[in-house]
Each structure stands twice: as structure tokens, then as C-alpha cells.
Image: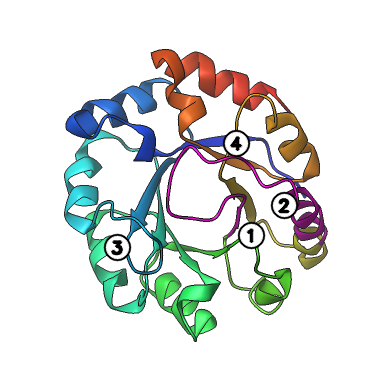
Amino acid sequence: MQQPTRIAPSILSADFARLGEEVRALDAADADYIHIDVMDGHFVPNLTIGPDVVKALRPHTDKPFDVHLMIAPVDPYLDAFVAAGADIITVHAEATPHTHRTIQYIKSLGKKAGVSLNPGTSLSAVDYLLDDVDLVLVMSVNPGFGGQSFIASQIDKIKELRKRIDASGRTIDLEVDGGVNFDNAAEIIAAGADVLVAGTATFANGEYAANIQRLKNAG
């Protein structure tokens, strides 16, 4: 069953010179999650942040840290991100040969576990994971950079994933990340998404609270 819409602003679009302040501002603006994009310059063509930055940000908010690991290999870094304060850890199905084992390990550490799918990856990659994951993230752009345009074909993927989650009978976040904005949020929510990752849209014009509320109201 689709849950109420929640917004997970991506700090990839924040002012990196003021990250602590930015996270506090997102908290005050009623963000539901703080989405932290971790990129390694290997699995994706960009470098962002590591566990030390997550740890430094942790005292600035009690909101859940939704940590999206776009790195390979991923398993050697899970303990560090948990220790740094991650609440949800999402790994890419394409980044590890043993996704189920990785999901189980995250959950053994007492954290919520998610799996992410790139635009060209079939939903079959999660068919045997829905009994275990807490979140499935549909990438609606090719990962690596913020500010990209939404890939329209992912709407059908979101719709089909919604059916599969509902058929599982489990409460699983269906999160969408990439090119989410005020023009397409309603369509994305109607397709079945209940968590929207929004970087550029959240930070537009510095109106964080108004932007988050506008995205929530799109559904």
C-alpha cells in the first residue's frame, strides 16, 4: 500500500561550504529524510563525500539519514557509514555480486536496507529481495550528477514496482531519485512513489520549506 508522500532533499545540491547549516535548515523546513549521495568516481563518474562528513553532519539533525551508496565495492564501507550515523543504507544492485548478502548485513547492523536500480536495470533484480528490503530506489537519471532531466521511461518502472511491492504485503518505501521537480512530481506520485528525492527543486530560490511542501502537495 502506497504511503503518504515524503521528501528526502539531496544535499548534493546544498552549499558544501555550509553543510551543517544546510542540514539544520532542511530539518526546520520539515524534510522527512536527509538524502546523502555518496559517489566514488568509479561506480559513477563523480566524487562526493565519505563517512567522516556523514559523522560531522549527524549532530545537526535527528531526521533519518538516507545514505545512497553509489560505490563499488560497497561491502567494505558499510560498517563505517553505520558508525557515522546512517539510518537507511541503499546499495546498487549493479554494484555488488551478492546483493542479498549485503542487504542482510546492513540489517544485521540494525539499520534499514535499500536497493537501488539504474534506469537500464530490470525490476527482476529485486524480485527475490522484496522480503528483505525496507526501500527500493528507482534511479530516474543515470547516477553521478545532480541537475539531470527525468527519464520518462522510468514512470512505467515505478508503476510496475508499485504493483510488486503491494503484492508482497510489506511496507517498503518506493523512492525515486533524479530530475524530480514541481512539473513531474504529481505524475511520479501517481505512478506509485512515496518518497521523492529532490535536490535542485528543494534548494531553488532558498525557499526550502515552501518547496518541500509544494512537492508533498503534488500528490
At x 63% / y 75%, what residue is drawn? 129
The picture places residue 40, in percent across and down from the top left corner, at: 31, 63
The image shows residue 72, relative to residue 204, as above or below, that is below
The picture places residue 191, in percent across and down from the top left corner, at: 79, 44
Q: Which amino acid does label 3 sit on?
A: Val
* Separation of residues labelled 3 and 2 (CA atoms): 30 Å
Circles 3 and 4 in contact, beta carbons < 8 Å: no
- Mark identifier at residue 180: 4
Q: What residue type is labelled 1?
A: Pro
Circles 1 and 4 in contact, beta carbons < 8 Å: no
The secondary structure type at the circle numbered 1 is: loop
- Of tags 3 and 4, the one toward the viewer is 4
- Mark identifier at residue 154: 2
Query: Neighbour class for label 3 at 10 Å: few (<14), some, many (≥20)?
Result: many
Q: Is residue 20 left or right of residue 28?
A: left
The picture places residue 45, in percent across and down from the top left corner, at: 38, 59
- Mark identifier at residue 119: 1
Q: Which amino acid does label 2 sit on?
A: Gln
Query: Neighbour class for label 1 at 10 Å: few (<14), some, many (≥20)?
Result: some
* Separation of residues labelled 1 and 4 (CA atoms): 14 Å
- Of tags 3 and 2, the one toward the viewer is 2
* Separation of residues labelled 2 and 4 (CA atoms): 12 Å
